Image (cartoon, rainbow, N blue to C red):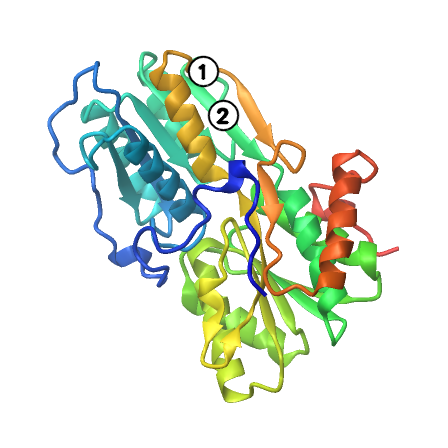
Amino acid sequence: MENRNLKKLLGLGLTTGLILAACGNGGDTEESSAGSEESTSTDDFSIVMVTDIGGVDDGSFNQSAWEGMQAWGEEHSKEENNGFAYIQSNEDSEFVPNLNQALNADFDLIYGIGYKLKPAMEDVASSNPDQHFVIIDDVIEADNVASVLFKDHEAAFLAGVAAASTTQTDHVGFVGGQESAVIDRFEAGFLAGVYAVNPDITVDVEYAGSFGDAAKGKQLAAAMYSNGADIIYHASGDTGNGVFTEAKDRMNANPDDQIWVIGVDRDQTDEGNYDGGNLTLTSTLKGVGQVVQDISNESMEGNFKGGEVSNFGLAEEGVDLTEGNLSEDVWTVVEDYRQQIIDGEIEVPENPADVKAE
């Protein structure tokens, strides 16, 4: 089934093939595209992003942000490195040096992609009050930092509805990256969506402890599929490439035993291609790319929203779900639940502890 076009806000950062293939080799990506470029003039507005672990080819969160930055560069005829750039983080200890590298290169707006950058950005931002920063997926209370959140639990709820309405084994799974308030939202929403459809479905939940460990993702997926799960939703960045690899290996070996993966943050249809077809059931979408483009434009026009917090959900068209390989009947169910969330009839929990199978 072909994916239908989604709302404009989600249009950027969610298409595939704009940059490197999502092969999961984030650690092999060039360490920095900012390099040692000379300082840009204040009249030549420039932006840079410091990645979370996983790299701009993670097929997920970092990649969607980078695609939005590329789209902004194309919109304004800017060249990579001078007008826009990324600096890759391969481990947490690189966050502060990378932010300082961006600062020293005189970029006008510095993005921290992911909640893990919060402590580092708080430190660097407090020491440089005239520099503008944006933190994605967390909040920093400072006049020179704009904070962006997404209601990931709302999109994850729809993924849970899709999984519960599709499973043939009444057994599904969730693979998270690192435990945190952000990934709690994904897990809570998914659980709530599954149980809203059928409280008797078994849901396996495991965490890899990393957003950049595809081997661990493959291992966790293998255990879940062997234990009877036929659908796994991952919220684990580059680790999720291992989930896809395990599913594809199994489908190639036994194409009659249908299993699925639900993608995250961008349309991960391509990650599900195997010899006999496609096993990406659907993907939750997160409009990081469009938000990056919008904030960059506003800031370039002198409207930087320092000290403000933005939060995007289904009603704001900031998160969503692809139709993917869902049946028409299941898609109708998903759409009904979507409208209930938008209308306020369903309040999706953000903490797994608040989710109970009735």
Which residue was labeled with disc 2? Answer: 147
302 is higher (above) or lower (below) than 251:
above
Q: Indicate the position of residue 329 as horizontal and vertical percent values.
A: 76, 62
Q: Do the residues labelled 2 and 1 touch (CB within 8 Å)?
A: no
Q: In this view, does 169 lie to the left or right of 84?
A: right
The residue at 33%/27% (across/down) is 110
Name the foreground residue: 79 vs 226.
79
Q: Is residue 328 left or right of residue 121?
A: right
Estimate how packed mark 1 is, as few (under 14), some (14 to 19) or many (20 or more) residues with alpha carbons within 10 Å.
Answer: some
Q: Quadrant of residue 132?
A: top left
33 is higher (above) or lower (below) than 357:
above
Q: Distance between the residues labelled 2 and 1?
A: 8 Å
Which quadrant does the N terminus fall into? bottom right
45 is higher (above) or lower (below) than 184:
above
The residue at 44%/27% (across/down) is 294
Total marks placed: 2
Q: Indicate the position of residue 272 as horizontal and vertical percent values.
A: 49, 68
- Secondary structure under tag 2 reads strand
Residue 211 visible in this rendered orientation of the protein: no
- Secondary structure under tag 1 reads loop
Three-letter code for the amino acid on which mark 2 is drawn? Ser
Three-letter code for the amino acid on which mark 1 is drawn? Gly
Q: Indicate the position of residue 221 as horizontal and vertical percent values.
A: 55, 71
The residue at 14%/23% (across/down) is 39
Which residue was labeled with disc 1? Answer: 306
Q: Earlier in the sequence, mark 2 or mark 1?
A: 2
Q: In which quarter of the image is residue 36?
A: top left
Q: Which residue lies furthest to the right in this view?
A: 358
Q: Indicate the position of residue 112 as horizontal and vertical percent values.
A: 39, 33
